[in-house]
Structure formats: C-alpha cells, structure tokens
Amino acid sequence: MPQDPYATLGVDRDADADALKKAYRKLARQYHPDVNSDPGAQEKFKEVSAAYEILSDPEKRRVYDLGGDPFGQAGGFGQGQGFSFTDIMDAFFGGQQGGASRGPRSRQRRGQDALVRLDLELAEAAFGATRELKVDTAVLCTTCLGSGAAEGSHPVTCETCHGRGEVQHVQRSFLGEIRTLRPCAACRGYGEIIPDPCRDCAGDGRLRSRRAITVKIPPGVDTGTRVQLSGEGEVGPGGGPAGDLYVEIQVSPHRTFTREGLNLHCRIAIPMTAGALGTSIELPLLEGDLETEEIEVERSVTIDVKPGTQSGTEHVLRGRGVPSLRSQARGDVVVTIEVETPSKLDDRQEALLRELAALRDEESPDGRVQPAHKGLFGRVRDAFKQ
C-alpha cells in the first residue's frame, strides 16, 4: 500500500479532478527523471504517479477512502492496469485531460484563406469601385457533395481501430506498463475508410475550378489595403467550410496627383511672367477620372495665382482629397506653384528683360542670403519691405 496519496500530491481530501491534475503536473515536472538527476527523484516520481493513479480513478479512490487496497491483489504500482503515458505528457505539454481518447478526427476541415491582388487607378481607390475577379480556388465537388465517396457508395467503419481513429500501443518500462494512443495508420485517424472514392475528386470532396467573384472596393483604400471576403476562399477537405478571400490593393501611379495619406499633391509650372503678373489656371480634379453619369461631380477647379507669386507657393483646396476609409473625413488637395525661368531668349526678349532689369535697378544684384527659419517678427518685417 503506498503512502497517503493526498499527502503525496499535497491536496485536500475533497480535491476535484482539476485540482488533482494541477498538483500532479507540478510534481511530475519537478521529479521526472529526464529533468531531475537527483538520486531520489525517480522514486519520488513513482510515488507521485502512484498517488495520482489512485485519486484520478473514482473506483480506486473510493476503495482507498474506505480503507481498502486500491490495487486489490495486483500488489502495487505498475502491476495492475498500469497508467496512461498521456498523463505524463500532459504534465509537460498540457495535453488532453486524464489521458482520455481524442476519438476520430473529422474529414471536414476549414479551407485555407486565399489571396489575390487587384490593380486600381487612383480615382477607383479614392472613391470606391466594383470589379469582377477571376479566381482559381478549391470548390465543392458536385458529384459526391464533399463526402469523397463514389455515387451509390459510402464510407465504412475502419476494422483496425473500430471507428475510434486511434490505436493503443502498450510497452513496459521501469515505470510499469505505458499505454500510448496513436492515429490509426489504416484510416489515418478518421475512423472510417472510403472503399470506392469519388472519381472526380479522388475522395478529397473538392476540386479546383475558376470562378468569377464580384468585389466591391470601399472608398479610401490604398496600396497594401486588404479587403476581406468571408467564405470566398478555398473549400475545406471533405466539403468543409470555405476559408476567406483577401483582395490586396495595388494603386497605379497617377499622371497628375501623388497621394500622401488622405492628401493629394500636385505641382503646376507657370512662366516667370505669369508669376509676376498673376494668372488663372484650370486644374482637373481627381473626380474627373470617374466614369459615371449617374451623379454630377465637379471635375475641375480654378486656381487664382496672385501677381508676384514665388516658386514653391502652395494653394490648399480643403476637403477635395481622398475620403477616409474609416470615417467621414476627407483630405485636401495641395497645389505647389513652380515659377519657371526661361532658358532660351531671342534678341528682342533679352533686350526687354535688360530694360526691365534697369527699370528695377536689378542689373547687378548681389543676392540675398535667406535664413533657414524666420521668426514671426522677421516675416512681418519682410512683408513691410516688399
């Protein structure tokens, strides 16, 4: 008769199965010979395992509590029914409770997710679009409807494991009889065998096919954005539920605008005379790329360039940028003016410019070195000097 199993595991006499399991795992980790080389560790591990064998078995625990020998005539630990090796593995890897059988695994499993890439124009990404995609994925076999069996046949129970999906292997060691459960090799753990597989899908319950999917792209997406379509991915083995389809967006460069977050940036080049005298410029908006007649959109806007405009001056059109994907906000359009200096002049043009330089006393200018940053008062002072 082993010593008091309650004292060995350090639990109360009314401890439930969870408390017993927790105490056993802790002590098994501490005294297992593979992790503890102390001379007495092996013996202590045997005591802990024997105590757990008694208390985890309701009948043995009842016999012990009544003062009897829980091992009957077997004589002690390891000589009766033995214990499951899965209890020891549970202690180290947190496996299944009490070494219970897992049972056969289902042929039906969730399918894998699929990923496709979609090229969009900037206007489509900004304002949304509806596109049709051709995707190659696994679909349900219409012949066997996912069962994997040929028409008129059906799966049969595996004769090796009798439908359990696993077989028990017993071997003896210094710990006694160790029982391990392994997936049945005959049925690969399913518990049943398909004697006559479907000829179209070879028993997999699915086959590959090309199909068309309509995708609605929400406004505000950008390069790298993934649109999730639930249940549009690969159908799972055995006709299991389909995974998801992810559409990854790739936005093509635009001829006028570059995108930075929700803002659109563009640069407009004007001649030197237009910068000096001022002008008006018609700027096509991104909405002008929309191919729609159902709604009326403003396709361009007039930019007023004031006389004396310097190169690098910015005009900001509030709320004319890209809509936010997650809110009602919308970015801006930032227009940067570039004043171009003519590089080729004929004689008449050169004479006129020299005359203008003389009138402005700019024939031999020294130039002004501008500070990298001006304070508020410096900017005010320069404004009065102009």
Image: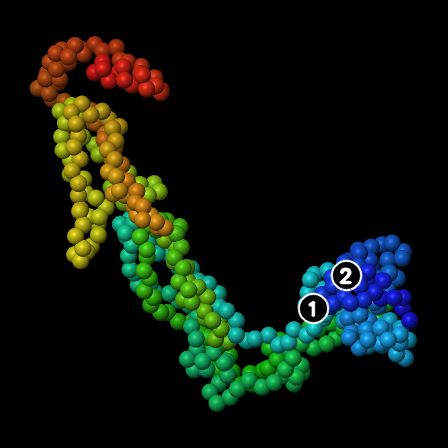
Q: Position of residue 173 (x, y in %)?
A: 84, 69
Q: Residue furthest bottom?
A: 152
Q: How is the image coloured?
A: rainbow
Question: Residue 55 appears in which quarter of the rendering?
Answer: bottom right
Instruction: Reply above or below: 139 against 122.
Output: below
Residue 120, visible in the rendered structure: no
The residue drawn where x is 50% and y is 80% is 148
Q: Give the residue type that dot 2 points to.
A: Ala
The residue drawn where x is 39% and y is 62% is 229
Q: Position of residue 262 (x, y in %)?
A: 33, 43
Which residue is label 1 attached to? 97
The residue drawn where x is 26% and y is 50% is 123
Q: Give the residue type that dot 1 points to.
A: Gln
Which residue is label 2 attached to? 23
The residue drawn where x is 20% and y is 25% is 309
Which quarter shows the N terminus? bottom right
SS under mark 2? helix
SS under mark 1? helix
Which quarter shows the C terminus? top left
